[in-house]
Amino acid sequence: MERSLGDGMNISFWDETWCGESPLKVLFPRVYALEGDKKSKVAHRINISDWNMVLRRAPRGGVESSQLEDLNAVIQDITMSDNKDGWKWSLASNGFSIASARKFIDEHTLPCGLSCTRWNRVVPIKVNVFLWRLNMDKLPSMTLSK
C-alpha cells in the first residue's frame, strides 16, 4: 500500500512515504533535524516560500543548504487536489487483487527454483499446508541426541 496525495491534510510530511521511495526524513536528515514541527502535514509544508519561518534556525551552508535545495527541487512540482488523502494498492495498477498479493508473496518468500504456491481445493487445508511445509523443508521436527 502507498499513500495517495489528495489535499495533504492527513499525510505526515516527514514520516510517511508520499513522494518517492522513502520518507523525506530519510532522504533529507539534516533538514529534518532543523524542522520545528516534525509532525507537520503535507498541506502545511508543500507551498512554503520561506523555510526559515518553520526551521529552528537557518541552514548554515554545506550539507544543510544543499539538502534544503534538493528538498525544494523534489516538492516543487507536487500538486494537491481537493480530494482527501488516501491509499492505493501498489502491486497492481488496476487495484487490489488476490493474484497480485500471491504473486508478490511467491516472488519474495520462495527460494529460487520452487514453483508458485498452488492449493488443491479437493483435499483438506491441513494437507495443503503439510505439503507446502514439506516442499519448503520446514516441517517441525525434533532430533533427540544420545
Image: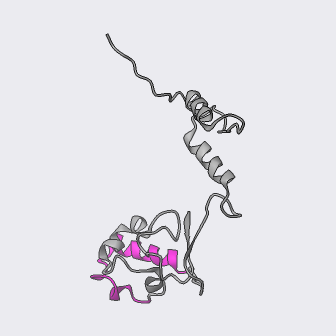
- The picture quadrant where one finds residue 97 is bottom right
Residue 7 drawn at (x, y percent): 54, 84
Q: Relative to 94, is 6 on the left or the right?
A: left
At horizontal 56% and vertical 76% (from top left) the residue drawn is: 5
Residue 74 drawn at (x, y percent): 51, 74
Q: Relative to 23, is 7 on the left or the right?
A: right
> For the image shown, how many numbered marks are present on the structure?
0
Q: Quadrant of the C terminus?
A: top left
- The picture quadrant where one finds residue 60 is bottom left
Q: Quadrant of the N terminus?
A: bottom right
Residue 113 drawn at (x, y percent): 63, 31
> Is residue 52 shown in magenta?
yes
Front residue (pair 144, 125): 125
- The picture quadrant where one finds residue 119 is top right
Q: Is residue 65 above or below residue 143?
A: below
Main secondary structure of the magenta stretch: helix
Q: Relative to 34, is 78 on the left or the right?
A: right
At horizontal 72% and vertical 36% (from top left) the residue drawn is: 122
Colour convention of the picture: one colour
Front residue (pair 92, 143): 143
Residue 65 drawn at (x, y percent): 36, 76
Q: Relative to 24, is 5 on the left or the right?
A: right
Q: Is residue 93 above or below residue 52?
A: above
- Return the residue found at the far top: 146
Front residue (pair 35, 94): 94
Magenta-colored span? 49-76
> Is residue 102 shown in magenta?
no
Q: Is residue 129 above or below residue 20?
A: above
